[in-house]
Image (cartoon, rainbow, N blue to C red):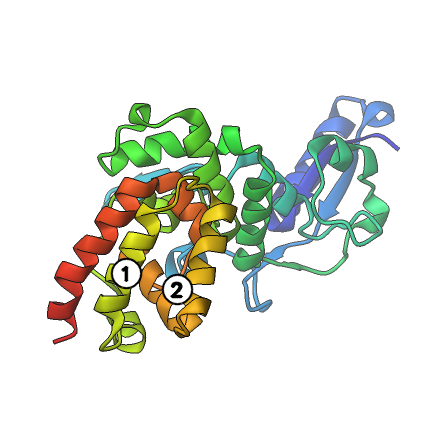
Amino acid sequence: MEVSHVIRGEEWLPSAPLHVLLYEAFGWVDTMPQFVHLPLLLKPTGKGKLSKRDGKKLGFPVFPLEWHDNSENGEEVWDGFRETGFLPEALVNFVALLGWNPGDDREIMSMDELIKDFSFAHCSKSGARFDFDKAKWFNHEYLINKPDAELAEMFKPVLAQHGIDASQYSDEFLARVVAMVKGRITFVKDLWEQARFFFVAPDAYAEKDVKKRWKEDTPRIMGELIEVLRGIDDFSSKPSEDIVLGWITDNGYHMGNVMNAFRLVVVGECKGPHMFDITELLGKDETIARIQKGLEKIPSVNA
């Protein structure tokens, strides 16, 4: 069966009879296409059809692109999926599975797969709930599966928005940065929040982490750590880790407190990628400079 008209939701009601009447009036009944009615898109709650007002109220886009609605009451702007940060292929994948499934448990599907496997037999007869969290999940999945070099190129405009000249960093450096943090992002713009410490040394330190991890003897231990780091010839991740962890163990220091204090002064908070992957990229001089800066600033924060 060839279907040339697919109409979703209430658009079916006024348009389908009109199409049929026109074909009959012109004697084209034999060539009249088949019409298929796809289910309504429902609100995230599953109750009632989705409207653009729901998007405005609940904080998610309902238009593919930013939409400017001009009326006598003034211009109203509606967020678009593109401007929110969605990849086109992620959005297509998400929308394709609203009210349809491939007959198995696949969710990530390319355009070619969607075209090949689509059939009306697997279309739902009931409404499809619009789940914005699911849409974000799709975007996350597509981002983390992009090559690191491609994602690094997408990150460059974000860096520029934050006053960072990406040309000062090698493409390899940027690719390694995004590889470390992309598992934590939903949109490309999220890379800045997750990776800013690679480009800007912290000026402030997470208060809750300072209270929990900055002990009375931490400044002395961090001072010792500086000397340990200075003595490391190969500052790559694994050799540095072996030396630092060995030093902590040999001195009977609390592993968690020392490593979290180390992370705190370098990153600004006690979270992020593997610590010695971070220090390898920052380099010895920058790592030591951040410890020294933390020693100067954190006591006043913790006073």
Looking at the image, residue 33 sits to the left or right of residue 235; the answer is right
Q: Which mark is residue 216?
A: none
The quarter of the rendered structure image containing the C terminus is bottom left
- The residue nearer to you, when weighing 176 against 256, is 256
- The amino acid at mark 2 is Met
Q: According to the image, label 1 marks what residue?
A: 224
Q: Tell me the mark number nearer the camera, choosing from 1 and 2.
A: 1
Q: In the rendered structure, which disc, 1 or 2, sits on the residue that comes first in sequence?
A: 1
Q: In this view, does 301 lie above or below 128?
A: below
Looking at the image, residue 172 sits to the left or right of residue 41; the answer is left
Q: Residue at x 80, y 47 (%)?
A: 102
Q: Residues within 10 Å of mark 1 (few under 14, many from 20)?
A: few
The answer to whether residue 203 shows anywhere in this view is no
Q: Residue 37: horizontal and vertical position, in percent?
A: 73, 46
Q: Distance between the residues labelled 1 and 2?
A: 13 Å
Q: In this view, does 101 lie above or below 209?
A: above
